[in-house]
Image: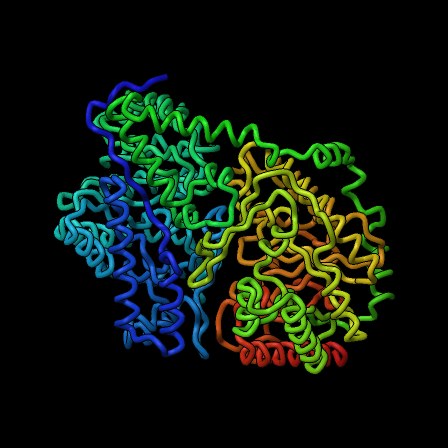
Amino acid sequence: MTPKPAAAAARATVYGYPRQGHDRELKKATEGYWKGRVTADALRATAAELRRATWRRLAEAGVAEVPTGDFSHYDHVLDTTVMVGAIPDRHRAAFAADPLDGYFAMARGTRDVAPLEMTKWFDTNYHYLVPELGPDTVFSPDSTKQVGELTEALALGLTARPVLVGPVTYLLLAKPAPGAPADFEPLTLLDRLLPVYAEVLADLRAAGAEWVQLDEPALVQDRTPAELDATAHAYQRLGSLADRPRILVASYFDRLGDALQVLAKAPVDGLAVDFTGAAAANLDALAAVGGLPGKRLVAGVVDGRNIWINDLSKSLTTLGTLLGLADRVDVAASCSLLHVPLDAAAERDIDPQILRWLAFARQKTTELVTLARGLSLGTDAIAAELAANRADLASRAGSPITRDPAVRARAGAVTAADARRPHPYPERATAQRARLGLPLLPTTTIGSFPQTAELRAARADLRAGRVDPAGYEERVRAEIREVVAFQERVGIDVLVHGEAERNDMVQYFAEQLTGYLATRHGWVQSYGTRYVRPPILAGDVSRPEPMTTRWTTYAQSLTPRPVKGMLTGPVTMLAWSFVRDDQPLADTARQVALALRDEVADLEAAGTAVIQVDEPALRETLPLRAADRSWYLAWATEAFRLTTAGVRPDTQIHTHMCYAEFGDIVRAIDDLDADVISLEAARSHMQVARELAAHGYPREAGPGVYDIHSPRVPSAEEAAELLRTGLRAIPAERLWVNPDCGLKTRGWPETRASLENLVRAAHAVRAELSTA
């Protein structure tokens, strides 16, 4: 269908943009500030320049309305906590003394004070800081950041729209504060919170905002009638305010369901709706509720979470259908572009043919502007762009890069028996205990040890040709020797080699598998100053040769204690990559699982007695709607078992998960049939241990007793107390002692001290058990 020109010229806009800068300037300035090398003023100046550069670039590209407020020094949900004055009691003194240091203390903790809990932002790999609220929480408005950034954009002569986390989503993302009743529901604070939002809206209006966007992605999840009533109440109150800008309520990541009618009826001025992927169902739903007469619709028709070029003709068809359903239709990506890298044009090492298939944030911006022009002026106005787009789509669809007949034949021959270990867990446990001879409450780590500046420099020297492969490998061997010697000296029971050779837990494997592409500059924020470069899954996957066996067996040659083989699982390999969108995820997962199965077999043949296959992304990839979950969990758990099911009964299979809400996937954790699972638990005070116990989880588990996402060193007694809490849920013969996650991002001094305390805690609790 060729859309008719829109009655009012369609505008292109975005909800948010990558924050880091072309060379990750924000990361470097922030970490420099933490280390005392950069002043607070210099950090703020770097941040301001990055914001200005982004806004100018968007405007020059043709974006008619730039977002403000989406920029963050660490996390936009933490920014909202500051905006509404919900500072936890333990951080109030620090925040009052210095708001910037208090802000970072909430994010990272201090020597004496724990940070806020961290978890995944819906089904993405972005982590947010969880608000802590209780019955006594008093909100107070602080619109300094939001007004300041709007003022900066307006001073550049730009049309700007502040973007805020909406009040309903903010409360639904929160957890009860320490000391609050366990059954306390933060949403009960809505009437206390809404006046704060009203004041912030008034402040933004006074500063010159014509529109303000309130993001409510929590509404694409299954919501109760009470939660939908609360949403209607919230937007009835905010929409009825006399002194406010026009309100645009945004949702993304999935279909709105019953919440769509609630928002359509609310006295707000517009909705921003996702129409990509599963959220394409929003189109029919919008028509079913009678559209949005008299309101603005911002249509998310470009995928904001993946890196493939948009099908412009298909998106124009969707936009043309939407024209009759709202007063005006504007064009946007499905969500913030925070979740994709900055600029595909910076990638010099990717085949130019493949580069034509890719769209990072800057390319997606161009697509949005093109679509807005086509919607306003008709397809003739963008005929050249449409022709080029069709050619690029055809190039990808017909490329031999995407298909390997041998891989497809092997995946098609998989049977149910291939994904089941033939021996039941009790039999395996007996064989593993006899082989390993571990003590009660065995200690281990999750896999990675600190990636020192020397290691990173050696890797850069190898890429640049300043050191030959032999010299680089000797540096890695020296690091492995140091890691193994330290673990032996401290008294850890099951060792790791430290992963000195690995740049990233997904990228390292992707670079050795067919079908994957690596980027040089494709950085995406995971949390705070932690950025990753997700590889691109463009074709069928196989493993040409062993990937980890050499380094694992070298480490094992240095110690009589067992050394774990370390792999990243198939679901995480997908979740932390930009996956192909031209076949079902289940098919791709099976290909990856078979490649990893070969690696597991080689590790076992080399004598490795313990093999860990990490699946930290199993929970984050869970579909947001319950109706979609059984299908996902079926193929996800099958992929893990397909990876691990070929080993002998006395080979112990571990897995690991971190920073997610585990309660609703406990059954799936059980279905993985791993012998041992380690999970994040320190910030949540062993909640997952209680969830495993409530499910009747029958195998071994290591809920973490050391929060590695904070620089603070937990005392031995603190770790021991968490361990005692874990023992109230998991029997001692099935409980492991370990950190929450890998130690890659930590420094050696804090790592040494924390692991020494972890081992002391394990020894102390063992002694208590022996005398009980």
The image shows residue 649 at horizontal and vertical percentages of 85, 55
Q: Is residue 223 visible in this depiction of the protein?
A: no
In the displayed structure, 311 sits above or below 231; it is above
- Report the label total: 0
In the displayed structure, 354 sits above or below 576; it is above
Query: Camera-side residue: 332 or 344?
Result: 344
Q: Is residue 467 left or right of residue 673?
A: left
Query: Camera-side residue: 388 or 274?
Result: 388
In the displayed structure, 456 sits above or below 18; it is below
Q: Is residue 736 visible in this depiction of the protein?
A: yes
Identify the image quadrant of the N terminus: top left
What residue is drawn where x is 86% and y is 61%?
430
The image shows residue 239 at horizontal and vertical percentages of 22, 40
What residue is drawn where x is 35% and y is 57%?
21
Q: Is residue 666 left or right of residue 644?
A: left
Q: Quadrant of residue 94?
A: bottom left
Q: What residue occupies the far top of the structure in this picture?
A: 1
Q: Is residue 319 left or right of residue 713?
A: left
Identify the image quadrant of the C terminus: bottom right
The image shows residue 574 at horizontal and vertical percentages of 58, 45
The image shows residue 37 at horizontal and vertical percentages of 36, 77
What residue is drawn where x is 27% and y is 42%?
61
Which colour assignment does the render follow? Answer: rainbow
Q: Quadrant of residue 132?
A: bottom left
